[in-house]
Amino acid sequence: MAHTLNIISVVCDDQSVREPLMNMLISAGCVAELFRSADEFLSSNGYISTSCLIADTQLPRSNGLGLYEQLILSGNVIPTILLVTGPDDDKRARALQVGVSHFLDKPFNNGELLACIKSALKDRTMIRRRP
């Protein structure tokens, strides 16, 4: 059986979040790709190889939830973790309705994020095995 490489794509415009997140993912043994915007992620075709998407809900133009919805509409189901700042029950309800895997409130700790990634990767395996 071939080994599948899991690529974690991070879409976040905040350098103070993006760089430490990248360092933490690498330290945890993950293969990570960083993108500053939803447009950059989509135009790179990064979604093709992404096993888990981490996206900020406060992006310019298309936020993390909008990005997820675009992916779903184009037939690209990627387990997604949204990084949320402050309470926004409407956005959370909408995200759960369309199938977002996890939410993490900023600031978050590395253990929480790694647990979400592990769960999201498990979700991706289940999605692939569906008939």
Image (cartoon, rainbow, N blue to C red):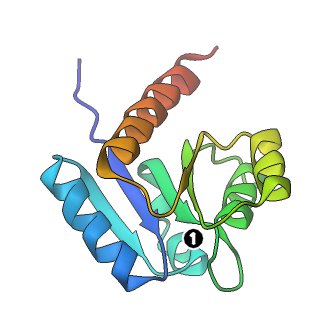
Q: Residues within 10 Å of mark 1 (few under 14, many from 20)?
A: some
**Residue 6: image location, x then y, percent:** 32, 42
Tally of marks = 1
**In the displayed structure, would residue 99 be above or below residue 74?**
above
Q: Quadrant of residue 22?
A: bottom left
Q: Is residue 50 left or right of residue 60?
A: left
Q: Quadrant of residue 55?
A: bottom right
Residue in front for this viewpoint, 97 or 75: 97
Residue at point 23%, 49% (across, down): 30
Most extreme residue toward the top, as rendered? 131
Indicate the amino acid at tag 1.
Leu
**Residue 124: image location, x then y, percent:** 50, 31
**In the displayed structure, would residue 15 be above or below residue 47?**
below
**In the displayed structure, would residue 81 be above or below residue 126?**
below
Callout 1: SS: helix
Q: Quadrant of the C terminus?
A: top right
Q: Is residue 52 left or right of residue 72?
A: left
Q: Is residue 20 left or right of residue 55?
A: left
Residue at point 20%, 65% (across, down): 23
**Residue 50: image location, x then y, percent:** 43, 51
Q: Quadrant of the N terminus?
A: top left
The residue carrying mark 1 is: 42
Residue at point 48%, 57% (across, down): 54
**In the displayed structure, would residue 65 be above or below residue 12?**
above
**Residue 119: image location, x then y, percent:** 45, 30
Residue at point 71%, 84% (across, down): 61
